[in-house]
Image (cartoon, rainbow, N blue to C red):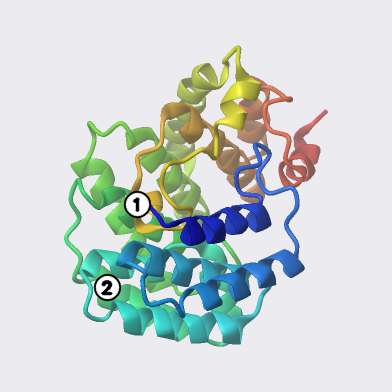
Amino acid sequence: MYSEDIKKVIDEYYKLTDYKNPYNNLNKSNERQQQVCELLENFLTRNDLNDELTMWAYWNISDNYALQRKANETYNNHKKFEDYLKDKELKYKLLLLVDSTQRLTLINGGYGEYWDNLYFNIMNKIVIDEFNVNIVFNVLRTATYNHQLNTNESLKKDALDKMKLIINMFDNSPMINWFKLGYYCSLIPYNLNHNINNKELIEESFNLFKIYEKILKVNNKEERLKDYHNTSVLMGSYEDWNKEIDEYRQARFIQNLIIQYIDCEYYNYAKAAYELIGSNEFESKYFKTKVRCIIS
């Protein structure tokens, strides 16, 4: 599919990002992230790249500058990426919007209005269908990400309305519970901040734990985790963001809802969910730190 020298660049990218590590990037560092940027910036000087490889490189350059919190560099690359995409199909412009680290780094650097304008310009034109719904939903997750820097409430409301629309439109999708999970994780803190009663929503969201708890209980957990980042598409490509994920991968996101319960001080629900899922299911340091307050 790719020439040998292109394969070497892709292999070096995966080595630097450690993406295929089953425990999710144990060797992240700013030094490695900068090396990814330099590797792919040089890669873009080639004249034999197709659209897939070019978009993959641009997205990952923005991402790795954002991971270093280099806002100016992220913005400058994003503008180059935007210029490259100006004559491409609208669906590919969603890549400019998908990823919360990139967005928050741009906001922190004073480029929040730039991202917001991109959002409305693209999302007001896109027609959501079965062929783009997964990447669109990932964009909406980025738009509604619960963080103190994310202060554009009208944009959040627009994205939440679109999330609800997707849930209603695609109720037979294999991704429907994952769509609901993302919606609950965004709507619960939004409602709390706007003094909207969350009681019914919390009860509704808790049902997902009963669904995903059974899916997480596999006998081959180590094997499933090792397979977690195996993919035939390039990480950060359009196809990657738009792919359908299986139920086990969906279930790994349920920890995000426990974290939202805790952040919104619904401690009883957080504790009940944690005990239902099991104390040894999620091992990330961040998650372990968050659940300390509910462990008796």
Q: Which residue in the protein does label 2 denote? A: 122
The residue sitting at 36% across, 64% down in the picture is 157
In-image side of 103 versus 220 (left or right): left
Q: Which residue in the protein does label 1 denote? A: 239
Question: Is label 2 in contact with label 1 (beta carbons under 8 Å)?
Answer: no
Counting from the top left corner in percent of width and height, residue 223 is at 61, 22
At label 2, which amino acid type do we have?
Ile
Residue 63, visible in the rendered structure: yes
Q: Residue 170, labelled with which disc? A: none
Alpha carbon distance from label 2 to label 1: 18 Å
Classify mark 1: residues with Cα within 10 Å, few (<14), some (14-19) or many (20+): some
Secondary structure under badge 1?
Answer: helix
Classify mark 2: residues with Cα within 10 Å, few (<14), some (14-19) or many (20+): some
Which mark is first along the chain, 1 or 2?
2
Counting from the top left corner in percent of width and height, residue 154 is at 37, 72
Q: Quadrant of residue 155?
A: bottom left
Q: Which residue is more in the foreground, 27 or 275?
A: 27
The residue sitting at 19% across, 43% down in the picture is 169
Say which quadrant the C terminus sits in.
top right
Residue 195, visible in the rendered structure: no
Which residue, as the protein is rendered here, is positioned at the far front? Answer: 4
The residue sitting at 67% across, 26% down in the picture is 281
Secondary structure under badge 2?
Answer: helix
Q: Which residue is more in the foreground, 25 or 181?
A: 25
Q: Quadrant of residue 36?
A: bottom right
Pair 2/1: label in front: 1
At label 1, which amino acid type do we have?
Glu
Counting from the top left corner in percent of width and height, residue 168 is at 22, 42
